[in-house]
Image: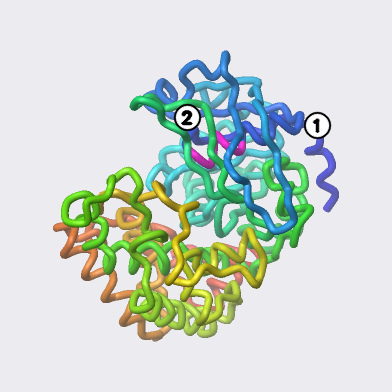
Amino acid sequence: MDMSYLKDMPIAILGGGGVGKTMAGDCALAGKKVRIWDQPDFAKINFRNIEKTGIKLGGHQFSYYGFERYGVGHVELATDDMAAAVKGAGIIVVATVAMAHENIFRELIPLLEDGQVIHILPDNCGTFIFRKLMREMNCTKNIIVGAWYTAPYGVRIIKRGGVLTNECKVEDRITTIRGAALPHSDTDAFIESAQYIPAMDAIRTGDGFVKGTTVIDVNLSNVNPVIHVPGTVLGAAVMQNFDTVLGQDKKNYSLYGFALCPAIAEVQAVFWEEEKALAKAMNVDICTVNYEDFFSRTTMYGKEYMGPDFAVPFEEKYENFYGDGPFDLENRYITEDVPVGCYLIQQLGRKYNVPTPTVDCMIYLANVMIKRDLIAGSKYTLEYLDIDHMDDEQLHLYLNEGVYTAK
C-alpha cells in the first residue's frame, strides 16, 4: 500500500512521558509538524514551559550505525485537548503505560478519521483493546492499528532540583524493531507508515523494521517481562540495601548495573524458553534471543542498539545505566510487567497446554513481595481482550484477517 499521503501530515503523540516527549522532540527536530497530548494532571507537569524551552535532545545516543540527532525541537502544540492533538494527524503514536490504554482509547476512538495509522509502543495488548473498543463503540473508520515490541530509545527525562525539565537524555537508539498490525493483513502498510516517523530514523537507516507474525508475536517478543520481573524480584536485596547497608547513593541505582548476575540470568533464560514453547504451540514467530544474551549487563537490549557482538560481562561495570532504577517495587517493572505481560503468557500457556512454571513462580513471588495479588486485581484477562472464547482456528482468523468470531 502506498502510504506516502502521510508525508506532509502532522504526527500526534499521546503521552508526555520519557518516550512520548522524546519522540515529539525528535520528530520536530527533523522538521515534522508535531502535536503532543497528555492527560490534564500530567500535562501541567510534563509540558511546563515547553512552549518556551522546546524539547532538548541530549545524551550519548549510542547506536551501531552512529545515528544521532541533537538540539531543540519545538512542537506545534502541547495540550490536554485530545481532539486538537489528533485532528488532521496522519500518524497517532500511543506512548503511555498499558494501564492508561483503555481510557485513552475511549477518548480517541470517536475522534478518528479515515486513513489514520495508530502506533502503540510497546503493545502490551493495546491492539486487542483498541479493536475491541472499536467494535463496542460501533466505530467503522478505515484506520490501521499496529504496535511495536519496544520503544526506539533508552531515555530518561532530566530532573534538576526536583523539577522535571524538557530535556531528554537519550542513552541509545535501537537499529531494528519488530512490529505488526491487527489484523495482520494491515502489517505491510503499518510498517511502511513508520518511514514517516522521524523518531525511527535510526531504525530506518539501520537494520530496519521486522515484520512480526501477528500481534501475538509482538507481545511475546516484548522482552520487558523476562528481564524486568526476575531482575527486580530476585535482585530486590540489592535495591533495598543500596543506600543503607551498601552505602551507595540511591539515585544511582540500576537493575542492569547492580542487580543482574549469572544466577538471575539462568532464571531469565528458562523464562524465555517457556515463551518460545508457547510461540511454537501458537504457530507464531518470536524475536531471536540466545541463551548467552542473558549473560550480559545489557542483556539482549545492548544488541538492539550496538549490534550483534555487543555484550558487557557481569565482571565489568557499565556506568551508562547508573540511575535508571527502579528504586522500589511499586514501579512498572512489577506493576505493569506482572499483571499484563506475565499474565498474558500464563493465560495463553494454559489455553495452549504449555507449562510456564518459571513465569508462574515470578508472578507468585512478586505478589508476595508487593503484598497484593497483582493477577487477581488485573483486568488483563483473555476475556477482557475478547479472545478467550475463540479456538485456535478462530483466533488466527481474527489475528490474520480481522474476522471476529462473536461469543
Nearer the observer, 62 or 166: 62
Q: Quadrant of the C terminus?
A: bottom left
Looking at this view, is 126 or 78 the one in front? 78
Instruction: Name the element at disc 2.
Output: loop
Left/right placement of residue 104 relative to residue 188 reads left
- CA distance separating discs 2 and 1: 23 Å
Going by the numbered disc 2, the residue's amino acid type is Asp
Q: Residue at x 48, y 65 (%)?
A: 223
- Residue 132, image x and y in percent? 49, 52
* Residue 179 appears in the figure: no
Residue 38 is labelled as 2
Residues packed near mark 2 inside 10 Å, few (<14), some (14 to 19) or many (20 plus):
many
Q: Residue at x 21, y 69 (%)?
A: 365
Tally the numbered discs.
2
Q: Is residue 377 magenta?
A: no
| Position in image of residue 271 (x %, y %) | 40, 78
From the top left corner, tell me how far across and down residue 314 is, in percent: 43, 71
Residue 22 is inside the magenta segment: yes
**Image: 156 above or below 259:** above
For residue 57, above or below residue 74 = below
Magenta residue span: 18-23
Q: Residue at x 22, y 51 (%)?
A: 247
Residue beneath disc 1: 8
The quarter of the picture where residue 338 lies is bottom left
Q: Name the chief secondary structure element in magenta.
A: helix
Which of marks 1 and 2 precedes in the sequence?
1
